[in-house]
Image (spheres, coloured by chain):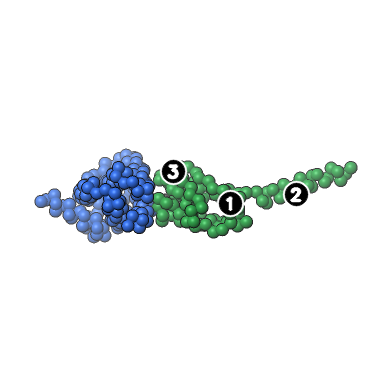
Chain colours: A green, B blue
Amino acid sequence: MRTDIVLPVVLGLSLGFATAAFAAETIAITMDKVAFAPTAVSARVGDTIEWRNADIVAHTATARDKSFDVNVLPNKTGKLVLKKAGKFDYYCRYHPTMTGTITVTE
Amino acid sequence: MLKIVSGACAVMLLGAGAAWAQSAKPNDAQIAHIAYTAGELDAKAGELALQKSKNKEVRDFATSMVKDHRAVNEKALALVKKLKVTPQDNDTSKALTKQAADKQAELKKLSGAAFDKAYVANEVAYHKTVNGALEQTLIPSASNAELKELLQTGLKIFQGHLAHAEHVAATVK
Ligand SMILES: [Cu+2]
């Protein structure tokens, strides 16, 4: 009787922890004064990158290997769900002086 | 004659910004006028490119020039209004306008790949000149902190344009 009640609680708790540990995260990057901040980020497959453009001009986050190209208008955000592991160098097509890196692990 | 001489002087000064900073420091009203004029002229060049070019890379670049320079100029207008500064015409603005008019006339005669090549080459040269003037003369001479900050942000945007123009130049060769 006693174990019947305790077991589900323990199970529920451990499940909760497991979910928290593997939950996908959202990583914020700001586009400000024609630069990505932070310049380099680390993430896991399944995480989301969210770029917020704080400048008065449009920017892009464009992968050198062409695997992604996110256009972000002033005062807007752009998102990308990371689907594969690797090191991705990216830049802004309109202002190629803006560069950044996303390192994705499994 | 007088007009030609003063125009030539201003171009020289713009090219050698450091010398200008020593001799005749422009005031904020003149700086605002020069920066605004430089931006508007490049937006106009972009509009001409959008009328004439069929090259996607060139059109994307021109679209960005029109949007970015107008966005910066909108900010500049709001700022001078707030600061109650009336932009003041000057020899540098006049020389820039004259040069741009000559360039537009030259570009209008071209078409196709010849236009693309000449437009983009001029964009590279133009952004080098304007960025040099901002770095060496306009930013160091600006006395109002908000104006200085806007010019600094503008410079970062225009340095991006120069890199973009150089990239497009390599594709239209
Ligand atoms: Cu950009």
Q: Residue furthest left?
A: B1
Q: Secondary structure at mark 1?
A: loop
The kind of residue on which mark 3 rests is: Pro
Tell me, yes or no, whether dots 1 and 3 are on the same chain.
yes
Residue assigned mark 1: A83
Q: Are marks 1 and 2 on the same chain?
A: yes
Q: Amino acid at mark 2?
A: Ser
Judging from the image, what secondary structure is the residue with disc 2 in? helix
- The C terminus of chain B - image quarter: bottom left
Residue B165 image offset from top left, x and y in percent: 34, 54
Which residue appears at 47% of the width and 42% of the height? A76
Q: Reply above or below: B59 against B24.
A: above
Residue nearer the viewer, A74 or B64: B64
- Number of numbered discs: 3
> Is B4 placed left or right of B143 in the picture?
left
Residue that numbered label 2 is attached to: A14
